[in-house]
Image (cartoon, coloured by chain):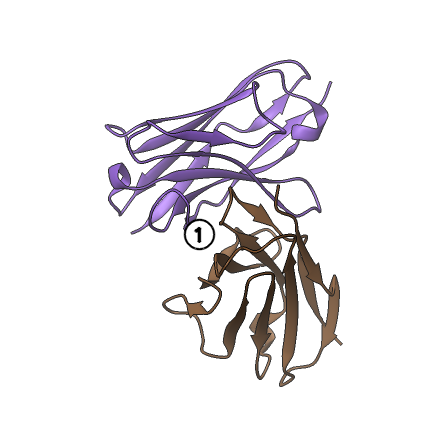
Chain colours: A brown, B purple
């Protein structure tokens, strides 16, 4: 099984900050990685697919990068609506999610 | 309107069965692979099972293998999850999600989820 490890688990930030979340795969997954945002009581929402492709309708302050085993999600100019939990997901071999990163207000 | 609506959740005793449904609308369901994903209270996301657009390919997680079965009825735009021999650690919100392209891709549409609680 492919394990996905996100860091940090919790991130405290302020509106306007640049935020970076890291996701590491236990083996190479090429660029078969997605990022989702989840708010309390809601279903996850797709942000990024194929490591760096922005889903339609998602603000351009969200960006993804990486390949192989190391990936990042960056939120530039953090907005109030961005406080949420973020998950990475590999779909190279079956499907596995990272444990999540909660972005909270500092 | 593109949407997925899950139903069938509830409280069930350990060892019993439950069948979840996910009704799709607003897109070509019969061309879409469909997944079930669950989330235990306060925990992260766990993939459960997937079925190809035509129902010919199915895969499931080791944690549910031999107990859960995914199926679909394209005439009713619905995907199902039959859950047998339920255990306490199956307690979770169960989401259905659409694979964006082929079976082995990301999810672009999610339902709102249905809560399954396994408790005596």
The residue singled out by tag 1 in the image is B106
Q: In the rendering, at what x and y percent does residue B113 appear?
A: 51, 41
Q: In the rendering, at what x and y percent does residue A12 appear?
A: 75, 73
Q: Is residue B75 above or below residue B47?
A: above
Circle 1 packing at 10 Å, graded few (<14), some (14-19), many (20+), is many
Seen at 31% across and 42% down, the residue is B32
Q: Which quarter of the figure is the C terminus of chain A placed in? A: bottom right
Q: Is residue B49 above or below residue B101?
A: above
Q: Chain of mark 1?
A: B
Q: In the rendering, at what x and y percent does residue A104 appear?
A: 71, 69
* Circle 1: element type: loop
Q: In the rendering, at what x and y percent does residue B1 appear?
A: 29, 52
Q: Nearer the viewer, residue B83 or B61?
A: B61
Seen at 57% across and 76% down, the residue is A75
Answer with the quarter of the image where residue A40 lies: bottom right
Q: Which quarter of the figure is the N terminus of chain A placed in? A: top right
Horizontally, residue B119 falls left or right of residue B57, namely right
Count of number-bearing discs = 1
Seen at 71% across and 22% down, the residue is B119
Answer with the quarter of the image where residue A14 lies: bottom right
Q: Is residue B109 above or below residue B88?
A: below
Q: Nearer the viewer, residue B66 or B39?
A: B66
Seen at 24% across and 44% down, the residue is B28
């Amino acid at each position: 099984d492919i394990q996905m490890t996100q860091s940090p688990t919790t991130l405290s930030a302020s509106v306007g900050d640049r935020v970076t979340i890291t996701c590491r795969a236990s083996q190479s997954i090429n660029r078969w990685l997605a990022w989702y945002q989840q708010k309390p009581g809601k279903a996850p929402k797709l942000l990024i697919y194929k490591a760096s492709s922005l889903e339609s309708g998602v603000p351009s302050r969200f960006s993804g990068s990486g390949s192989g085993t190391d990936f990042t999600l960056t939120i530039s100019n953090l907005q109030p609506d961005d406080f949420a939990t973020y998950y990475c997901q590999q779909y190279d071999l079956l499907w596995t999610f990272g444990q999540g990163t909660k972005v909270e207000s500092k | 309107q593109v949407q997925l609506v899950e139903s069938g959740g509830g409280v069930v005793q350990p060892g019993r069965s439950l069948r979840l449904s996910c009704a799709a609308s607003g897109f070509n369901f019969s061309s879409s692979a469909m997944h079930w994903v669950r989330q235990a209270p306060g925990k992260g996301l766990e993939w459960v099972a997937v079925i190809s657009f035509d129902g010919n390919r199915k895969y499931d997680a080791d944690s549910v293998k031999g107990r859960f079965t995914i199926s679909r009825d394209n005439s009713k735009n619905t995907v199902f999850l039959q859950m047998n021999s339920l255990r306490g650690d199956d307690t979770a919100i169960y989401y259905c999600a659409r694979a964006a392209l082929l079976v082995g891709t990301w999810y672009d549409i999610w339902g709102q989820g249905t809560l399954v609680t396994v408790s005596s």
